[in-house]
Image (cartoon, rainbow, N blue to C red):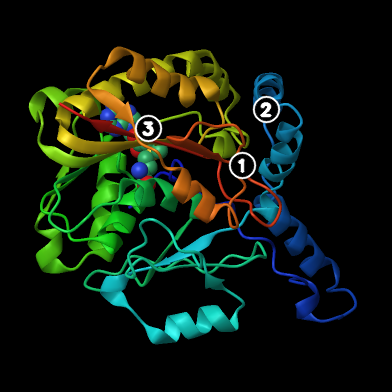
C-alpha cells in the first residue's frame, strides 16, 4: 500500500551519502556514470523551494517574528541541515539498538529533569543531520523505533497522560504522537481519531507496527470529523490532544504542485476557523477537571495563540495551564520563542537544533 506523507512529523530526504559516486572507483571512461548518478540522486534529494510560499511566509513571518524569521528561514529552506530523532518502542526494546545509536553519536534527548518524563519514554538525537534508516512494516513484527521531529514530543509531554486515564487523540494520523503517548502510560480508554480515510489506514498500520496485541485491542480507532466528537462523546475523556491540521510550514515550502499551493494559500485563512471548531469540540468531550493540549507545526500566530485566545475568551469553563516549567527544562535542547505566555510555547528551528516549528498550548476544563 502506498501511503501519503506525514503532516507534522515529516522528515526531509536524507543527506546524500558523501562520495557516493567516487566509491565506484576512478575508472577512466566510466567516470561520468557515477557522476551522473550522483547528480541524479542529489537532484531527487535537493527538493525545490516553492517561491510563492516563501514570498508569502516572508511577508507574514517578518511581521510576526522580525529578525528571528531570517534565522528560522535559513533552517527551513535547507533540508540538508534538518535533523530527526529516534523514538524507541518500549514494546520492542533492544539493547543492541541503543548501543548502535550511541556508537553512531546519538544521545538521549531529555537529560534535564522535566515536570513529566516517564522513564519508559526514550528518544535519541544526534547533533548532525544524518538520518537513521527507517524500518519497514513487517506483519507479525513490531518496529523498534519511530523517526520524528523531536519537537513532536513536547505536546505529548505537556499532556502528562497517566495510567488508567481516558485519552482522545482527535487528529491522530499518521500516529507518531499516539505511539509516543503509549510509551508514556497505559491509558484506560485510548481513542485515536482521523477524519481522512487514507490517513486513517496509515494510522492503523502505525499502531499495528508499534503496539502489541492485548493493548492494541483496547485502542479505538475512528474516522470521525473531529468537530463532531464533542457532541458524540460529551465529557468522556480526562486528556485530549488536538494536534490540528495546519499550514505545516516545513512541507509547504517544498510544495511541487503550484495549483494546489495557490489553493492552500487562499484557503489558509480558513484553517483558524477549523482549528477553533476542533478545539470547541474537544472542550465538550473533556470531563470537568480534564486537560487538553493544542499543537500545530506552523509559526503562524493566526493558527496558534490567536486560536487559543479565542477559545479562552469564549469558554468560561476553560483556563490556561502553566507549562513554563516544562519550557525552562527543555530550553537547552529546543530554541523557544521568547515573550510567549505561560500556557504556551513555540519551538523555532535553529542550526543544530533544527526542531519544530511546533506550537504547544495547554488548557483545562474547570466545570
Ligand atoms: C498535524 S496532522 C496530525 C499528526 C499526528 N497527530 C501525528 O502525530 O502523527 C493533522 C491531521 O488532522 C487530520 N484532520 C483534518 N481535518 C480533520 C477533522 N475535521 N477531524 C479530524 N482530523 C482531521 C488531517 O488529515 C491530519 O492527518
Residue 167 image offset from top left, x and y in percent? 19, 45
Q: Which residue is mark 1?
A: 348
Is the residue marked by circle 3 packed among few (<14), some (14-19), or many (20+) residues within 10 Å? many
Circles 1 and 2 in contact, beta carbons < 8 Å: yes
Instruction: Say if residue 300 shows up in the picture.
Output: yes
Residue 314 image offset from top left, x and y in percent? 30, 13
Assign a secondary structure to mark 1.
loop
Residue 27 image offset from top left, x and y in percent? 86, 81
Q: Nearer the viewer, residue 54 or 188?
A: 188
Q: Residue at x 44, y 41 (%)?
A: 7
Q: Residue at x 26, y 72 (%)?
A: 91
Circles 1 and 3 in contact, beta carbons < 8 Å: no
Q: Nearer the viewer, residue 35 or 317?
A: 317
Instruction: Say if residue 9 shows up in the picture.
Output: no
Q: Does 154 sit left or right of 36 as displayed?
A: left
Q: Which residue is mark 3?
A: 244
Q: CA distance from mark 1 to mark 3?
A: 18 Å
Is the residue marked by circle 1 packed among few (<14), some (14-19), or many (20+) residues within 10 Å? many
Sooner in the amino-acid sequence: mark 2 or mark 3: 2
Q: Residue at x 74, y 42 (%)?
A: 74
Quadrant (top left, top right, bottom left, bottom right) of the C terminus:
top left
| CB of mark 3 near ligand 1 (< 8 Å) | yes
Q: Does 161 sit left or right of 26 as displayed?
A: left
**Which quarter of the figure has residue 115?**
bottom left
**Which quarter of the figure has residue 42?**
bottom right
Quadrant of the displayed image that contains ligand 1: top left
Q: Which residue is mark 2?
A: 65
Badge count: 3
Assign a secondary structure to mark 3.
loop
Amino acid at each position: 500500500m502506498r501511503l501519503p506523507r506525514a503532516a507534522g512529523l515529516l522528515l526531509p530526504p536524507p543527506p546524500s551519502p558523501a562520495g557516493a559516486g567516487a566509491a565506484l572507483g576512478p575508472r577512466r571512461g566510466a567516470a561520468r556514470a557515477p557522476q551522473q548518478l550522483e547528480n541524479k540522486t542529489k537532484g531527487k534529494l535537493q527538493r525545490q523551494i516553492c517561491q510563492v510560499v516563501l514570498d508569502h511566509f516572508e511577508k507574514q513571518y517578518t511581521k510576526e517574528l522580525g529578525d528571528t524569521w531570517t534565522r528560522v528561514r535559513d533552517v527551513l529552506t535547507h533540508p540538508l541541515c534538518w535533523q530527526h530523532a529516534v523514538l524507541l518502542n518500549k514494546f520492542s526494546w533492544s539493547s543492541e539498538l541503543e548501543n548502535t545509536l550511541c556508537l553512531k553519536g546519538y544521545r538521549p534527548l531529555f537529560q534535564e529533569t522535566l515536570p513529566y518524563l516517564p522513564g519508559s519514554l526514550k528518544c535519541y538525537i544526534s547533533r548532525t543531520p544524518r538520518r537513521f534508516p527507517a524500518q519497514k512494516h513487517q506483519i507479525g513484527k513490531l518496529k523498534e523505533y519511530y523517526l520524528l521531529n523531536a519537537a513532536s514530543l513536547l505536546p505529548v509531554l505537556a499532556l502528562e497522560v497517566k495510567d488508567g486515564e481516558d485519552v482522545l487523540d482527535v487528529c491522530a494520523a499518521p500516529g507518531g504522537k499516539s505511539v509516543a503517548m503509549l510509551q508514556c502510560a497505559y491509558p484506560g480508554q485510548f481513542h485515536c481519531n482521523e477524519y481522512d480515510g487514507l490517513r486513517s489506514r496509515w494510522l492503523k498500520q502505525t499502531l499495528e507496527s508499534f503496539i502489541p496485541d492485548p493493548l492494541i485491542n483496547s485502542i479505538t480507532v475512528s474516522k470521525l470529523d473531529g468537530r463532531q466528537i464533542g457532541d458524540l462523546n460529551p465529557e468522556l475523556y480526562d486528556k485530549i490532544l488536538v494536534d490540528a491540521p495546519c499550514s505545516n510550514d516545513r512541507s509547504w515550502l517544498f510544495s511541487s504542485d503550484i495549483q494546489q499551493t495557490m489553493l492552500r494559500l487562499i484557503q489558509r485563512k480558513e484553517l483558524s476557523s477549523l482549528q477553533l471548531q476542533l478545539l470547541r469540540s474537544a472542550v465538550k468531550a473533556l470531563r470537568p477537571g480534564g486537560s487538553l493540549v493544542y499543537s500545530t507545526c506552523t509559526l503562524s500566530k493566526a493558527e496558534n495563540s490567536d486560536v487559543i485566545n479565542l477559545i479562552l475568551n469564549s469558554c468560561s469553563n476553560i483556563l490556561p495551564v502553566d507549562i513554563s516549567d516544562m519550557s525552562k527544562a527543555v530550553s537547552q535542547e529546543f530554541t523557544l520563542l521568547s515573550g510567549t505566555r505561560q500556557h504556551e510555547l513555540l519551538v523555532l528551528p535553529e542550526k543544530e537544533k533544527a526542531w519544530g516549528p511546533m506550537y504547544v498550548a495547554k488548557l483545562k476544563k474547570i466545570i
